[in-house]
Structures are given as structure tokens and as C-alpha cells.
Image (tube, helix red, strand yellow):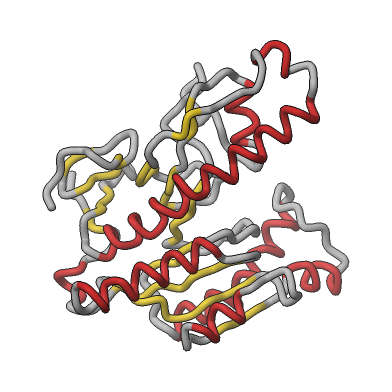
């Protein structure tokens, strides 16, 4: 069974071309751009280049335009709420109508991806489900943790809340190579752990849903700094260097070695 690099750096003989997709503050995208600039300052040509920024929002809640302006790269927005409103559609993708609408919405971004010859799409806080291929996403949970029926345990928007209420003692962020499911694609990397600190015993806190939600939100903000902001640019960098590969069954490899629970810092690997 052959291992195919996600990006074949040796064959390309050029930096990997990245499109950054975002919906809000764009901190993950900023971290990615800083990593690119750091290579230019310290190590010469970067292994990847952010070619443009795309957003599914056109209001002031998205900072994509200012980030693009500050970094002298093109910016495009296509508001998904207006897209659905003008067509009288709901935003759910759980129906066939919803999925068809999402493919229609994605067709605009797909044209940009083709025109700019993009190799990888970096979903840096992009809140819309996407049908586009070759995307890296970051998720606030350790996706190697499975349920008894071998499904990922902490998926969706409430992953941190669910992990804390389930009694986990630490949190990790994960990056994944997306597929057509929700947080179901191949696991690429997991961050260093963030210890969960509770102000009272869990069995006491579980009776106060408002307090538990506050605790989860606080931990999720901390996890962004220790997890998301570290492994998101790390993953893009390692893909650009040709280090990540997949086999025919979508198993993940780093430097030719299998990493079934995702690559974790400190692992033995070729450098």
C-alpha cells in the first residue's frame, strides 16, 4: 500500500500555495501568516505561501479584509447568510436541499481555488461546513479519543463542554484533513495537553449548567493559545515540507511512519 504525500514538495519545486478561509477574528490566519514571515526572516524562502483570504461573511464581524490589507494579499468575501436569505433557504446541510445549496455556495470559492492554483485550504476559524477538498481544519478536542462503538467522542461545537462534563482531566486541540463528515477526516496532529482546572468537584458543578458553560468557554479560550495557535501553522508547515502522507485507507503518516493518533510534539521522527 503506497503512501502519497498530501503535498509533494520535491515534485512541486515551489512553495505550497495556501488559501486561508476565515469567518471572525482570524487569529489562526494571523498565526499562519506570522509563521510564513518568520521563515522569510530566519530561514530563507518559506515552504508555503498564503495566496489569498476568503470569508463567508461580509460584515464587520470578520477581520479578513484588514488582515489581507496588512499583509498585501487578495481578499474575497461571499456572505453565506445573504446567500441563503435571498434564496429562502435554511442554513442546515442535513437535508439534500441544504447540501446542494452548500455546494452551490462553495462553487464560488472553488473557482478562486482553481484560478489561483491552490494546493491546500487552511480553515482558520471558518464557521461554514464546506464541500471543498484538500482542507485542513483545527478542532478543540483530542480526536483520537473514541466512543465504545469506535466513533470520535468529542466532535461538534460543544466538544470542550462535552469533554469537561465527561470527566476528562486534560484537553488537546487537533488538526484534521477534512472529508464530507463533521470532524471525521484523518487526524493529522494533536497539541500538547491543557490541564482542566475546576473550582469545585465535578459532581457539584454538573448541577449548575450556566457555571459549567462558563468554565468550558474559559478553557476553550485557553486551549486556543496552547493548542490551536500552535498546531495549525505547524500542520501547514509540515504538509508543505512533504512530511504528511496518506495511504489508500486514509491512514496518516509522518516521514513515512504511521501516526494513528495524530502527530504529537516530542514524537521520534525524521527532522
Q: Is residue 205 left or right of residue 4?
A: right
The residue most toward the right is 88
In percent of width and height, residue 127 lies at 64, 58
Of 219 and 18, which appears nearest the observer? 219
Number of marks: 0
The residue most toward the front is 199
Of 85 and 242, which appears nearest the observer? 242
Q: Is residue 125 left or right of residue 34?
A: right
Q: Residue at x 66, y 70 (%)?
A: 56
Of 36 and 126, which appears nearest the observer? 36
* Snapshot quadrant of residue 233: bottom left
Q: Is residue 117 left or right of residue 160?
A: left
* Snapshot quadrant of residue 82: bottom right
Q: Residue at x 88, y 66 (%)?
A: 88
* Vertical position of residue 118 compared to residue 24: above or below: below
In percent of width and height, residue 102 lies at 67, 63
In percent of width and height, residue 219 lies at 59, 37
Quadrant position of the N terminus in the picture: top left
In percent of width and height, residue 86 lies at 85, 74
* Vertical position of residue 16 compared to residue 181: above or below: below
* Vertical position of residue 77 compared to residue 220: above or below: below
* Snapshot quadrant of residue 5: bottom left
The residue most toward the left is 270
Of 96 and 148, which appears nearest the observer? 148
Q: Residue at x 59, y 61 (%)?
A: 126
Q: Residue at x 53, y 76 (%)?
A: 53
Amino acid at each position: 500500500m503506497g503512501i502519497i504525500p498530501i503535498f509533494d514538495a520535491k515534485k512541486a519545486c515551489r512553495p505550497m500555495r495556501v488559501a486561508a478561509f476565515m469567518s471572525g477574528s482570524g487569529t489562526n490566519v494571523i498565526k499562519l501568516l506570522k509563521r510564513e514571515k518568520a521563515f522569510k526572516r530566519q530561514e530563507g524562502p518559506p515552504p508555503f505561501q498564503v495566496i489569498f483570504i476568503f470569508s463567508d461573511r461580509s460584515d464587520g464581524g470578520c477581520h479578513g479584509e484588514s488582515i489581507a490589507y496588512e499583509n498585501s494579499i487578495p481578499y474575497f468575501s461571499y456572505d453565506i447568510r445573504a446567500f441563503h436569505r435571498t434564496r429562502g433557504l435554511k442554513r442546515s446541510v442535513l437535508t439534500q436541499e441544504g447540501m446542494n445549496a452548500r455546494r452551490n455556495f462553495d462553487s464560488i470559492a472553488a473557482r478562486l481555488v482553481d484560478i489561483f492554483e491552490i494546493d491546500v485550504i487552511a480553515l482558520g476559524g471558518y464557521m461554514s461546513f464546506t464541500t471543498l477538498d484538500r482542507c485542513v481544519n483545527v478542532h478543540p478536542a483530542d480526536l483520537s479519543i473514541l466512543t465504545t462503538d469506535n466513533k470520535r467522542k468529542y466532535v461538534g461545537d460543544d466538544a470542550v463542554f462535552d469533554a469537561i462534563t465527561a470527566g476528562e482531566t486534560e484537553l488537546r486541540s487537533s488538526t484534521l484533513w477534512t472529508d464530507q463528515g463533521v470532524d471525521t477526516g484523518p487526524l493529522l496532529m494533536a497539541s500538547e495537553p491543557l490541564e482542566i482546572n475546576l473550582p469545585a468537584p465535578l459532581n457539584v458543578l454538573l448541577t449548575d449548567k450556566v457555571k459549567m458553560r462558563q468554565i468550558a468557554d474559559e478553557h476553550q479560550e485557553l486551549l486556543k493559545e496552547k493548542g490551536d495557535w500552535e498546531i495549525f501553522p505547524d500542520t501547514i508547515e509540515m504538509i508543505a515540507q512533504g512530511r504528511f502522507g496518506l495511504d489508500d485507507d486514509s491512514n496518516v503518516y509522518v516521514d513515512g511512519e504511521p501516526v494513528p493518533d495524530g502527530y504529537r510534539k516530542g514524537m521520534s521522527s525524521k527532522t
